[in-house]
Amino acid sequence: MFKYIIIDDEPLAHEIIEEFCSMLPHLQLEKNCYNAIEAMQFLNSNTVDFMFLDINMPKLKGLDFLKTLTHPPKTIITTAYKEHALEGFELNVVDYLLKPFSFDRLVKAINKITDAQAKPLAVKEILDNEASSSRFFLKGDKKHHQIDSKAILFIEAYGNYTKVYLSDEMIVSHEKISSFESLLPQQHFLRVHKSFIVAIDKIKLIEGNRILIKEHKIPIGQTYKNGVNKLL
């Protein structure tokens, strides 16, 4: 679990960052700080993995606050002012997000932190009496979901995360797509693209270089065409 704080004097900025981060597994908000003094007091007695830091705040500016810290957490700057970017990177910030930023852009910044610090995460498999079925626990949305492989439609790589599409929901996981390729029974699942694994029995049709599963159109990678052709 990666612990973080938000330091920003705008409540709306907190709401946006919290909403985005709540969609990612293994992130835990420790504190909402609305000025640098409040953050300084918190960090004096607590440790976090990283922080979102606004630059333009009252009392003590974000970069001035960062200079006061002897061992600062990894820092992602969030600001509307791009002219401070060079100074920020001189202070070894991980990334510099210009407001308003998208979810994808925030994920890219967080990946720079988790790439360096993440430990391998185990998916706990549960043995099933039926040879055709495999169940396992998957952590996503800060919960442990028990997944029956028979309910999986397809899996999509999403940066350092993975989207697992089920019959009735989608779960974002921190597992790599290669972990699922090793875990899932090969007779029922097929890697059709570097970013996609599909459940063979959920394929509605194959047309040209794409596969249709329900309303989802999934590309077939050139490297994986032979494997798909064996289904035909």
Image (cartoon, rainbow, N blue to C red):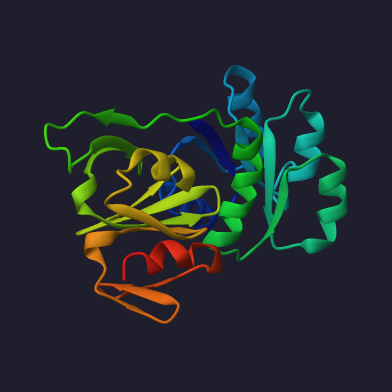
Picture coordinates of residue 92, whole percent (x, y): 81, 39
Q: Residue furthest bottom?
A: 208
Q: Residue furthest left?
A: 129
Q: Residue at 48% of width from left, 55% of height from top? A: 157
Q: Residue furthest top?
A: 45
**220 shown above or below 19:** below
Residue 91 can be seen, yes or no? yes
Q: Residue at 63% of width from left, 39% of height from top? A: 115
Closer-to-camera residue (229/140): 229
Picture coordinates of residue 208, whole percent (x, y): 42, 82
Q: Residue at 62% of width from left, 25% of height from top? A: 43
Picture coordinates of residue 39, whole percent (x, y): 62, 33
Closer-to-camera residue (226/128): 226
Does 63 sit left or right of 159 as displayed?
right
Picture coordinates of residue 136, whole percent (x, y): 26, 35
Does 159 sit left or right of 173 as displayed?
right
**83 shown above or below 75:** below
Q: Residue at 31% of width from left, 71% of height from top? A: 232
Closer-to-camera residue (202/147): 202
**29 shown above or below 189:** above
